[in-house]
Structures are given as C-alpha cells and as structure tokens.
C-alpha cells in the first residue's frame, strides 16, 4: 500500500515529521517497507530562457541562454543546446544542471558538445521528470513562476511516498483514511472528518438492478450521471496516482482509482450509452466470455459472479470491468457502481482467472459495508466537480435480510459484531498495565464504541472490569477479546512491554518436547545418517496420485484448491517423494535417496492425521553408495534396502525391533512378493516397505528401480516408565557362546522369517541370535521345495553346556521349526 505525505495529511491534521510518521507506522503494526523522500527531484530549478538562437549546424536545435537564479553559475546565464519545438525566449521551465540525475530517462547529466556547441545541462520535459508521458516539448510554466527556486516544491514533486506492507487482516488500511485513523489513535495528530455529504440528485436512476445471486452480492448501489465531459484528470490527482505507481487514464477512471486508494472503496464506471437494458448480478453461464479492460479474453463459468446487461456479461464482479462498456473521451453519461461482493468468491475467481487488480485486493480482504453508499456519493461529487453532469438518485439493492432480534444492523444489512472485553486480559496476555479509561479511549479512537457505560459505576467487580464494544464495520478481522487486546497493545506501544526474565524453576527442568516430537527428530537423524536427503513436499497432491495410494476420498478433496495438481490431501508421503525422484531423474539425477517426516491424512477427523516417516531410493542409491564402480557392478535398490531403512528408523524411534514381525500383507501400491508389513503383534501395524507396483508408478508417471517405506511414528507404543533412569548393571556371561547350523527343507512359499522366529522361540533363555546364511533351490530337493540354512547362537549363563544340553536344545529347535513351517531337517 503506497501513499504520499500530502495525501495522508488530507485525512490527518499533524505537524509530525516524516521520520516520526514512519517510525510510528511500524510501531503500530503497519510496517514501512520503503520511503521515497523525493531527493532525486531537489536539484531541478525553475529557470527562464533569456535568449534562443538557432544552432549553426542543426535545423532542429537551438542555443539557449538560461537564467537559473543567483545560486547557479554565479547568476550568469547558462548555455544549453535544446531541441524542443516550444523552446523560446521568455519561456519559464525546469532546468537541470550538469551532475543532476534525471529519473525519467535514467541519465546523469554532464557537460557535452552537441554539433560543436557546448551545452551545460538541459531544460526538462514532463516525461523526464516523471510527471506524465508528454515528451513533445519542455515544461512551460506561468510567467509568475519564481525563477531560481525549487521546481519540485513548486510542482509538488517533493511529496514523499511511503509504502507499507499490509497483513491480510487489515482491510481498513487499504485506504489512506484508515491509515490516518490508526496514526491519530496513536497520538500523532487529529483525524479529520471523513463524512461525505449526500448528493443533490435529479430524478430516479433509469437503469434497474436485479440480484439473482444475493449470496455473492450483499449489496449493490448504482447512480447515473448525465452530460459529463470526460477528459484528463487534474494535475494533483494525476501526480498522486503516478506517485503510487498508477498510470492516469481519464478523469472518470482516475476518480474510481483515487477513491479506491483514498478510502479503500473500489468502484466501477460504465459508459451508460453502451449498457443495453438493465443490469443483473448473477453467476456466469458455462462458456460465457468477457473481453476485459486489460485487453484479455476470459472464459467464465458458474463459479464466477458477473454484472450483465441484456447484451451479456459486462464485468467480473469485484475484479475487473469489460472493455465494451469502458469510459473514454466520448463518454457523456456514466453509471457509477458501488457494491459489496463475497470475499471468498472474489478470491477464488481472481485466482482461477489469473487476474490481480486493486479491486480484487480489497474485496477479497473485506471492504467497509457501511461505506458502500457514501463511497458512491464521494465518487459522484468528484465526477460532478471535475466532469460536470447531473446525477440521479442512487438505486440501492440489498441481498441480505435485516435482523429483528436486537442485533445492531447497519444501512446495508451489516450486522455489527459485539465483543466483551475483560480489561484484565491486556495484562494477562501482554504484560502491559493499561487503565480502564485509557483502554476505552484507545479503542474509541479506533472506532470501537462501548455498548454501555453503566458498568463504570457498577458495584459488581466482574461487571466493572469488563466492557462490551461494538466492532466498527471496517474491522472484519476483530472477532474476540484477544483482538481487542492486540489493538490496545499496538496503540499503547509494543515498546512499552518491559523485558522480564523467565522465572527460575529451582529444579532440574522436565522434558519439554513431546514423545512425537522427539521421535520425529530421531527418525530424521537416523535416515540422514543412512545417506538420505530430507525433502519437504506438498501436503496437497493430484487426485489420481491420492487414489493410487489409498486416498482420493471426497472428504479429503479441497473445496478451493490452489491448482488442479493440488486437489487432495495426501494419504501417504510416497507420492510426493516419488514425484520428486522422477523430476530429479528427468534432470539427470537418477540415483537419489530421500526421506520426509510429516503428516498424512486418512480422514477429515482429528484422529485421521498421522505422523509418518517415509523414504524412497532410486537407481543405485544404496546404503554403500551410488553410481558405477570399476571394482564391482552397480547394484540397483530393492526390497531389502527399503526394509533396512524402515527398521533403522523404527529402532531410532525406540520401537522394540527384536519383537517385530514382517508379514506379506502390504498395501496394493507395493509389489506383491517384494514388500512387507511391519507389525507388533497381529493388529499393531508400524509400517510398510518394499518395491512399488508398476501400476502405482505408472499413475505417477515415474520409472526406474524404486523402493520405499513408511513407518507410523504415532503407532509406536510408549515404553514403560522405569522407576529410575539409572542404567542396569552390565551383565556379561563368562561362558563361551556356541553356534550351531541347521538346514531345513521347506516349501518355496515359506518365509525365512518364520523359520527364524520358530528357532528363536525354542529356548528364549539360551538362544541369543538366529541368522539366515544360505538359501538353496534345486532339483535334488524336488519341485516347490527349498533349503534354508540358519546359524543359531547359544549363550549359556550359569554353566558350560554339555553334549546332552546341546542335543536337547537342538531337538527343541528342530521340533519348533517343523511345527511352525512343516519343514524337515535336511540330511
């Protein structure tokens, strides 16, 4: 939001310096992003052409002698070579001496020889001083212009420009008047009255307005002004608009732009002679088009609110007008429109159509509903003052019903919100001690009116410490007592909050982070240590991707997506990671390993969000490194890489990995037979891992060797709380461990993990480890059979094992495996 200092003083009576205004704006939450003090225009001086002689070697050039006052060239005339057709003896204009930077042409002047004649400076045109686009001649000032004085001060070019960065919750400060109100509340001056006088009208408006979509248009005001003379707007208005980066067009259009920035009230003007019939506010029909004022054609649909006449669409409501009914120099009758539009519809339509305008910027944040008719009156006054004409009565149509339950309702049907403000909240939330009267005064200067003042004399302590305020119509962001505390705090002064050290606890602090936060950090560290890069992907993914990974439910579809590729909440981290791997591969980085720890969404309920750690590997990005090597062929990633990553993350999070089971019932997006589910018991699923199903990769348009995993951090059970955090005494057996090998012949469908679990469960006190070291399949074993060899480590605790002990334990292991798998000991 940009404005000039003189513009601000139209609404604020103050003698504060520019520096103080800038400092105060930032202190009250309207952060100043830039200040242009117009120092670049200070060197330009009002000068008189003493003589103008033809150039001896150029027909279109003249040699001027310029009097720039006693401070320039010791009062002697300066020689300037000029090619302006209007240069003449006696002309008074703007002079720039050598060394002056000319902003309009981005050049720093110096003494020069032009066709053999020395020139010391230049006489400037309006374009060179960024006053307009006129470059046909040099500036021609009145005869009474004071020679030798600052041209910037004379022409108003020394008016500083202030730019503030508005947060989306401050629509009231999208107009200069709202900014002035905040400064006045902060004690920087007196707010001038912004009341608008009613218009003296002549007859009814002949154009009717019908609201077919009242839910999108709470109010609409329209007035016809006949017999206007449209031309350039006055210099003061053009200068202000150009100062904030806007290009003057004509008086009628400039008036609407001026009111938009002056009061935060967007308006639109139609050439009444180009409007056919009456106006209707409705939803656009599928396939309707509009050639807008920016010269672009827009395809519209039922999600877009439009203003139409008998001919068709003439304006996209709250965003941009149509070129067909635009005002130009031939306009004689004008329809001025001031309306209220649904902020959500304006925001969505503007984003879908790719239109960014000053009107959209304000309507999607919320304009003051009670200034709809006064805004129309203000624009009418400016039109009749600058363009003449005779206005009709304003036709006002409301799309919202009025209330009858005692709620305060404004002239446009706006329901004024009321908020109870316990005065003690300021101290509790901010640490500031602001008295009752001071708090009420601050809020009063901001436009918040006390509902009643009876509480001031109340004997009820609770009642006297709470005041109910009526929220002004221009503050849709204020909803509760905390918002009022914020208003008091920023006006009273954030700098008044005294820094207070945190109180000493007097004891060892307890854990601050939650278990989920700690485990998320541990998972990140463990996966990063395994050579994986952390990625941050969108929580929104295309519907096809969500459906391929178990999502795509209607409840998780966004009602207002940023784009078509971000339509659904992700049910898994894997689609985003796989898509990122695909993009890397397209750019020549095929060997990637990446992970993410974030949330996934299984339903729209609070318990439907899960904390997940997921990762993928592509190409040859194994734990030992990626790429080709002269000493060994590069191995591509597979299911066991994903399994190792998953177990490493689970172990880091504190899961009891020794008791986990791996089953084959992985989801459909994993490759059957090359994937698994990690469980703690029959029902507690802690994660999945494996290679991906070709159909899932095809849905994501991703190719290559790929594997991945997901573990559910929030599903890992909390460890049992111990009476003490002291580690137990280290217990090492003094007896030698014994290793025995067993080979079992089982069916090819039998999982090696089943054999390992059966062997480990044969004697839990004695068996300390079981590892698979060989798998063999051959004709000697028969069809559908395989041999799985395991190494069992036996660790005695109290004595050396005898042959009888080893035979007993071996028999127990063989029996346990045979019972669990149906296999037999291989001879």
Image: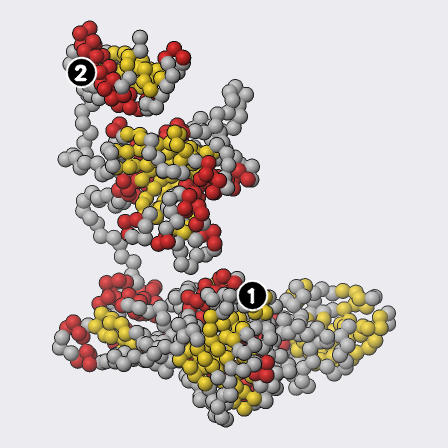
Residue at point 77%, 82% (across, down): 89
Question: Picture coordinates of residue 101 (x, y %)?
Answer: 65, 65
Quick check: 505 left or right of 139?
left
Q: Earlier in the sequence, mark 1 or mark 2?
A: 1
Tell me the number on the disc at residue 15. Answer: none
Question: Picture coordinates of residue 526 (x, y %)?
Answer: 36, 34
Quick check: 406 left or right of 107?
left
Q: Secondary structure at mark 2?
A: loop
Residue at point 83%, 66% (across, down): 116
Label total for image: 2
Residue at point 63%, 71% (across, down): 130
Residue at point 22%, 21% (across, down): 761
Q: Secondary structure at mark 1?
A: strand
Quadrant of the rendering where the C terminus is positioned: top left
Front position in the image: 476 or 760: 760
Q: Is residue 604 among what the camera can see?
A: yes
Question: Picture coordinates of residue 568 (x, y %)?
Answer: 41, 51
Q: Quickly name the residue at label 2.
A: 797
Which residue occupies the extreme top position in the image? 803
Q: Quickly name the residue at label 1.
A: 298
- Residue neighbourhood size for the residue with mark 1, other residues' Cα within 10 Å, grouped as few (<14), some (14–19), many (≥20): some
Question: Picture coordinates of residue 12 (x, y %)?
Answer: 43, 79
């Amino acid at each position: 939001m940009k404005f000039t200092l003189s513009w601000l003083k139209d609404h604020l009576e103050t003698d504060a310096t520019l520096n103080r205004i800038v400092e105060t704006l930032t202190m009250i939450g309207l952060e100043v992003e830039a200040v242009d003090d117009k120092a670049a225009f200070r060197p330009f001086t009002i000068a008189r052409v003493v003589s103008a002689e033809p150039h001896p070697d150029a027909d279109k050039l003249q040699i001027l002698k310029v009097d720039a006052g006693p401070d320039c060239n010791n009062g002697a005339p300066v020689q300037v070579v000029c090619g302006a057709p209007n240069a003449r003896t006696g002309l008074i204009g703007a002079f720039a001496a050598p060394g002056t930077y000319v902003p309009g042409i981005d050049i720093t002047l110096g003494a020069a020889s032009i066709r053999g004649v020395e020139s010391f400076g230049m006489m400037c045109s309006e374009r060179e001083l960024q006053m307009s686009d006129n470059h046909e001649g040099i500036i021609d000032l009145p005869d009474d212009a004071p020679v030798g004085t600052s041209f910037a001060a004379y022409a108003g070019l020394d008016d500083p420009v202030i730019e503030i960065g508005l947060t989306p919750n401050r629509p009231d400060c999208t107009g200069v008047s709202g900014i002035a109100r905040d400064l006045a509340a902060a004690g920087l001056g007196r707010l001038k009255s912004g009341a608008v006088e009613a218009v003296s009208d002549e007859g009814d408006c002949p154009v009717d307005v019908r609201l077919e979509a009242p839910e999108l248009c709470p109010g609409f005001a329209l007035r016809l002004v006949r017999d206007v003379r449209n031309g350039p707007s006055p210099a003061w208005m053009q200068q202000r608009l150009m100062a904030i980066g806007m290009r003057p067009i004509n008086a009628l259009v400039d008036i609407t732009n001026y009111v938009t920035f002056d009061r935060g009230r967007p308006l639109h003007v139609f050439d009444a002679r180009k409007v056919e019939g009456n106006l209707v506010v409705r939803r656009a029909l599928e396939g309707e088009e509009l050639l807008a004022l920016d010269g672009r054609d827009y395809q519209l649909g039922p999600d877009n609110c439009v203003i139409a006449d008998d001919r068709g669409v003439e304006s996209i409501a709250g965003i941009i007008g149509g070129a067909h009914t635009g005002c130009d120099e031939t306009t004689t009758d004008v329809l001025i429109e001031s309306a209220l539009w649904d902020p959500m519809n304006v925001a969505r339509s503007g984003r879908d159509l790719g239109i960014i305008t000053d009107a959209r910027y304000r309507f999607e944040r919320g304009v003051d509903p009670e200034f709809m008719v006064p805004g129309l009156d203000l624009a009418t006054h400016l039109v009749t003052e600058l363009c003449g004409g005779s206005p009709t009565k304003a036709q006002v149509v409301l799309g919202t019903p009025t209330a009858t339950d005692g709620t305060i309702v404004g002239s446009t049907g706006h329901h004024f919100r009321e908020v109870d403000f316990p005065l003690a909240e300021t101290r509790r939330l901010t640490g500031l001690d602001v008295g009752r009267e001071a708090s009420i005064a601050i809020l009063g200067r901001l436009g918040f009116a006390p509902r009643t003042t009876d509480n001031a004399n109340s004997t009820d302590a609770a009642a006297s410490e709470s005041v109910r305020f009526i929220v002004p119509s221009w503050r849709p962001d204020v909803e509760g007592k905390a918002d009022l505390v914020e208003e008091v705090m920023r006006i009273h002064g954030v700098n008044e909050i005294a820094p207070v050290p945190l109180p000493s606890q007097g004891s060892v602090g307890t854990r601050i982070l939650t278990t989920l936060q700690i485990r998320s950090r541990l998972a990140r560290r463990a996966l990063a240590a395994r050579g994986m890069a952390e990625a941050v992907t969108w929580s929104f993914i295309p519907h096809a991707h969500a459906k391929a990974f178990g999502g795509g439910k209607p409840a998780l579809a966004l009602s207002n997506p940023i784009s078509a590729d971000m339509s659904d909440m992700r049910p898994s981290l894997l689609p985003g990671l796989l898509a990122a791997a695909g993009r890397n591969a397209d750019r020549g980085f095929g060997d990637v390993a990446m992970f993410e720890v974030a949330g996934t969404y299984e339903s729209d309920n609070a318990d439907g969000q899960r904390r997940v750690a997921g990762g993928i590997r592509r190409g040859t990005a194994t734990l030992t490194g990626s790429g080709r090597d002269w000493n060994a062929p590069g191995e591509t990633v597979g299911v066991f890489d994903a399994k190792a990553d998953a177990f490493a993350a689970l172990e880091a999070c504190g899961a009891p990995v020794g008791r986990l089971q791996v089953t084959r019932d992985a989801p459909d997006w994993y490759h059957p037979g090359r994937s698994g589910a990690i469980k703690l018991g029959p029902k507690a699923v802690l994660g999945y891992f494996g290679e991906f199903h070709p159909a899932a990769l095809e849905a994501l348009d991703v190719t290559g060797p790929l594997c991945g995993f997901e573990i559910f951090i929030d599903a890992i059970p909390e460890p049992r709380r111990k009476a003490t955090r002291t580690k137990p005494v280290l217990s090492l057996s003094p007896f030698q461990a014994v290793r025995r090998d067993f080979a079992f012949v089982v069916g090819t469908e039998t999982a090696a993990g089943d054999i390992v679990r059966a062997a480990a469960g044969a004697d839990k006190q004695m068996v300390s480890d079981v590892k698979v070291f060989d798998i063999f399949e051959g004709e000697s074993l028969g069809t559908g059979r395989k041999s799985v060899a395991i190494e069992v480590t036996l660790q005695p605790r109290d004595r050396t094992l005898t042959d009888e002990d080893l035979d007993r334990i071996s028999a127990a292991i063989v029996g346990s495996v045979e019972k669990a798998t149906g296999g037999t000991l291989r001879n």
